[in-house]
Image: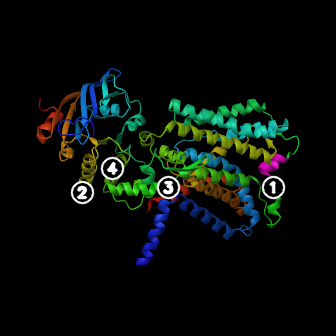
Amino acid sequence: MDKKMTWQTKVKHLYAQSAIAGPLTILILVLLVFSAFIPNFFTLRSFSGIINAATLTGVVTIGITMLMITGEFDLSVGALVAMGAYIYGMNANAGRPELGALLAVLIPGLMGAFNGFIRILTNIPSFIVTLGSRSIFRGLVWVVSGGALLQTVEKLPIYNFFNGRMDIINQFLEGANFRTSLIWLVGIILVCQFVLTRTQFGNHTFAVGGNPGAALAQGVNVKRVKVINFILSGALAGFTGVLLFSQYTTVRVASGDGMELSAIASAVVGGTLLTGGYGSIWGALIGVLTISVLRTGVVLLNIPFIPADNFEAVVGVTIILAVILNNWLRGRA
Amino acid sequence: MSSKQETQFGREIVRMENISKKFGTITALEDVDFKVHAGEVRALLGDNGAGKSTLIKILMGVYQPSRGTIFFEGKPVQINSPSEARALGIEAVYQDLALINLMSISRNFFLGREMTKKIGTVRWLDMHGMNEQCRHSLHDIGIEIRSPDERVGSLSGGERQSIAIGRGVHFGAKMLILDEPTSALSVAETRKVLHYIVNARERGLAVIFITHNVNHVYQVADSYTIIRHGKLVGSYSKGELSQDDIADLITGDRIC
């Protein structure tokens, strides 16, 4: 009896202290349910498909997660994905893909800085600021592209470097179809995870989102931390544009539309608080994977009243249920 | 201590002279004088809206005075921001502004002054060092914690106050500012927090204890400064006035 109590207390403690225990539980539950009802779900083929579908949103979500931990939002990232893809694609077609990739990260990073400075100079909530800049940036994409669809002239080797098939690995794994973007995602996760949990800047990021007044009183430069995270969010969105163009070798003005909402949804399903001060990079990954599993699962299940095209409704339900469950798991201890 | 002794306390830490503060046409403070010495607990008393927090926010560098001078350890200073105040050695133990509930005890303890390790240009947090140092320093001033990893949000109000006080003592603050530190606490917790305040005084810190209720501070205060409607009513030492006298002066039921 005594031993059992200790075990239960330990579990409670785990859910209260660990930011990812709740989200991971949800992901495993969803996987189990789909594996039980869908034949051939538990295979490398479907898993690599789920992961491929999650990588692009994943990179955006990492930036959004760090920004949300500082207590801010960025609704403009979808437009910045398109901007990054155009900058990269147009330069690649002009014979300078390396410069294009660099600019595709730097320019959206500057646009993120614009969001950040408007936010701290005017004190307008970032939800409103980026709701505005979302349309402004989409307009800039229009100007840059002339409204035209951009396609690649020739297949460059650099496309494989950023987001090609990993045939070296895939040939050993029956049915697998992993892409190099997965390596970029994992690399970005590891770097951001280190920055967030093991550096002074990460410590300040949590502090600024948790209690800006207290952070300021302890000498934390609140505005600087916020602006840097806006820049990071923009730069990662731009890099997602590079990955997107490398995979599809085409981009249109509306590319990336809705990605901002998927990213926020993934961050929230991954346990990040909308109010700031709490969240994790691994949680963000788990959130992205959960939504990707749902997307694939719903398509494969082929339920009559949930057509595959209507999977957004399923995501909506998941967001609400996940937040309820996360809060419940965290709050019990 | 090298400086000259004044009364029964140590050297003067802060002296504010003729402080006035106007917000537009509203006068929040008018010609207020205030001082604290090392090893002194000074109660700053006044009813809600009397100007206590305006005076303290001037000291904290949140507001600039419209008129008047601040002396820190005898030298005139301009305090332009909370971090400048902290660099001087002024540590605020504010109820809502001291700690971040979602972060651990040791991360709070070292916030803004993190211990780091470094290889080349990569610098990272020395979590082990901070945890050990945090536990050790709090233990030194009589505060026992379960784990430095514990989130501050799961601690009681008294525990939170004591950690903020302990942090100030550890980082060599010369002055602690406590804003209603005991008003939301149980009797047992209040006793503990008052004990840590006395401990800080014995270590030679100047303590400003802000409250609107003289009962909260009577046990530990060495002196009182009372303000009403933005004006100084007077400064008194312990024993000059009874608890009832002070309460009357706060509300203005008696003119002194």
* A201 or A94, nearer to the observer: A201
Which of the two discs, 2 and 3, sits closer to the camera? Answer: 3
Q: Is residue A2 left or right of residue A26?
A: left
**Helix, strand or loop status at disc 4:** helix
Instruction: Please tell me the numbered disc located at residue B63.
Output: none
Identify the secondary structure beneath mark 2.
Answer: helix
Callout 1 secondary element: loop
Judging from the image, mark 1 belongs to the subunit labelled: A
- Which numbered disc, 3 or 1, marks the residue closer to the eye? 3
**Residue under label 2:** B188
**Chain of the residue on which disc 2 is drawn:** B
Q: What amino acid type is highlighted by mark number 3? A: Met
Q: Outermost residue toward the front?
A: B2
Residue contact between numbered discs 4 and 2, judged by CB atoms under 8 Å: no
Whether label 1 touches label 4, CB < 8 Å: no
Whether marks 3 and 1 lie on the same chain: no
What's the magenta bit mostly, secondary-structure-wise?
helix
- Give the residue at mark 1: A165
Give the residue type that dot 1 points to: Arg
Q: Within 10 angstroms of label 1, few (less than 14), some, or many (20 or more) residues?
A: some
Magenta span has A165?
yes
Is A124 positioned to the left or the right of B229 in the image? right
Q: Between residues A151 and B207, which one lies in front from this camera angle?
A: B207
> Which region is colored magenta?
A157-166
